[in-house]
Amino acid sequence: MKKIINEEVLRTQKLAGIISENEYNKTIEEAYSDGGKYNLSSQENVEEMMRDVVAILGKYVGVQSTDNAAIGNDNRVKIYNMLNSGEFQQKISQMLPPSSMHQAYDHDNNQAQYWTNNPEEMAKFLNSIGITKHNFKSTN
């Protein structure tokens, strides 16, 4: 599983002798894994994620969880209405805000960089939310 790391903290710990060169290198290597099943650049992984999401939502529309068929149906209508009105998307955006995206800091150029393996899509997304000045760092 991919670890989110702060390379500057690691580098400082290495220089201070808190961690060894081997520990530093191992952590950096692990941080640049392919993400396994959580890498949504694979269509198969996207399908798996959607099955996971639907399974979670299914708990709110099923009779086993609600113990009441009417509540299950009412919940289904509520979910569809939230999807159709954009409320669902708005809530997801609030709970997973773009401002919380992972960034690295480039001390040489004194600027933050967004982590991405797909800079074209990332730039398009950032532009769509009003962030027009951006730099990228890849794990490839």
Image: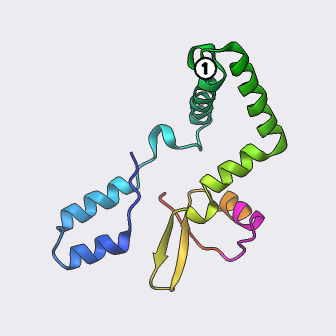
Q: Position of residue 54 (x, y in %)?
A: 63, 28
Q: Position of residue 13 (x, y in %)?
A: 24, 74
Most foreground residue, 42 or 71: 71
| Residue 30 shown left or right of residue 45 in the figure | left
Q: Position of residue 130 (x, y in %)?
A: 75, 70
Query: Where 46 falls versus 27 (above or below)?
Result: above
Look at 30% across and 70% down and name the residue there: 10
Q: In the picture, residue 133 is in which quadrant?
A: bottom right
| Residue 99 shown left or right of residue 89 in the figure | left
Q: Secondary structure at mark 1?
A: helix
Most foreground residue, 103 or 96: 96
Query: Where 20 falls versus 47 (above or below)?
Result: below
Q: Specify start and end residues of the magenta stretch as a single range.
A: 125-133
Q: In the picture, residue 19 is in which quadrant?
A: bottom left
The residue carrying pointer 1 sits among few (fewer than 14), some (14 to 19) or many (20 or more) residues within 10 Å by Cα, namely some
Look at 74% across and 62% down and name the residue there: 124
Image quarter (top left, top right, bottom left or bottom right) of the N terminus: top left
Q: For mark 1, what is the residue? A: 66
Q: Position of residue 123 (x, y in %)?
A: 69, 65
| Residue 107 shown left or right of residue 44 in the figure | left
Which amino acid type is marked by label 1?
A: Thr
